[in-house]
Amino acid sequence: MIYDFNAVNYISAQVTITTSADGLSTISEWDFDGNGTVDQTRTASKKYHGDGSIETDARDKDASGAFLGAWETVTSDDGRSIYTGTDIDNGGVDNIRAAIVAADGSVTESFHNGYHNVAMLIPGEVYWKNDVAENAVVKTSSDGLTTTTYFDFDGNATDPTNNPTSSPSTTNFETAAVSQAQIDGSVVTTLAEKNSSGVVVARGTMTTSADGLTTSLLKDADNNGTYEHVETAVTRIDGSIRKVVTDYNSSGVVTQTVTTDVSADGKST
């Protein structure tokens, strides 16, 4: 058992983990509010296949037994190929991640989101678009300092998880984002969005502070050289987030400012 205690030394939460004698299955039970009742249960199992690969399966349910989510992960014998399938609605695999680690240490991740509801976006976070990409490819350099991400929001690109490789096609992936770690620990990402003809229609820059608590986006939505849209999100010490979105007209005059406060539990206030 693992316990969390509050300021007056009462149990505020606990988790109980039971492992089978052969170590291949576990049952985890969470009591999130410390009232002695199990709020969420996860059943997990591990299988070793003849080709040396390892399969891990997990399934979550709430206190009433209702389905919360399921995952399947298969790792190759050399650890360089990893497949993860996620079932969000209890109807089979919805979202897929396939990762390949090259000999030089660089990593290519391919994603397909069959379930891409905007409700999955995290409140208070800064996004290039208020949407979930149907397909994505993420390439990370061997030193971990540079990450290039390609997004297919409209779903007209080939699913890169069908035949994952270290060099997947990014044709019809309309948005590209190149993230570079800076010497001070911050990360600067340059973004470019193209139309179906391959013409750049929008550009932007996103910056995340070294501590990860502040993210800002400068967006030139019509690629005319002027930022018309600015977003800044700051995470406070209590885990809450304040997000400020400001729009400008062609003359640089503020047309609207929207401030959103999101509590630590993810609810807008």
Image: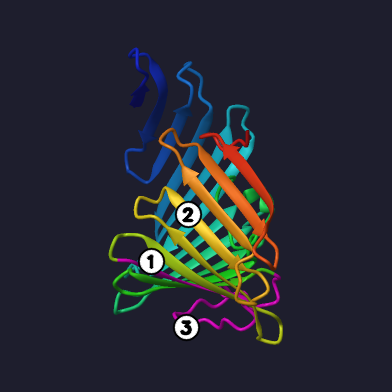
* Label located before the other in sequence (3 or 2): 3
The residues bearing labels 3 and 2 have C-alpha atoms spaced at a distance of 30 Å
SS class, disc 3: loop
The residues bearing labels 1 and 3 have C-alpha atoms spaced at a distance of 28 Å
Residue highlighted by disc 3: 167
Q: Which residues are magenta?
A: 154-182
Query: For residue 209, what is the image quadrant?
Result: bottom left
Tell me the quarter of the image containing the C terminus. Answer: top right
* Label located before the other in sequence (1 or 3): 1
Q: What kind of residue is marked 2? A: Thr
In the displayed structure, would residue 71 be above or below residue 155? above
Left or right, 5 with respect to 28, comes to: left
Tell me the mark number nearer the camera, choosing from 3 and 2: 2
Q: What kind of residue is marked 3? A: Ser
Query: For residue 62, what is the image quadrant?
Result: top right
Residue highlighted by disc 2: 215
Q: What kind of residue is marked 1? A: Gly
Residue at the spot x=61%, y=51% of the render? 245
Q: Is residue 81 visible?
A: yes
Q: Is 60 colored magenta in this rendering?
A: no
SS class, disc 2: strand
Residue at the spot x=42%, y=24% of the render? 13
* Residue 60 locus on image (x, y percent): 54, 40
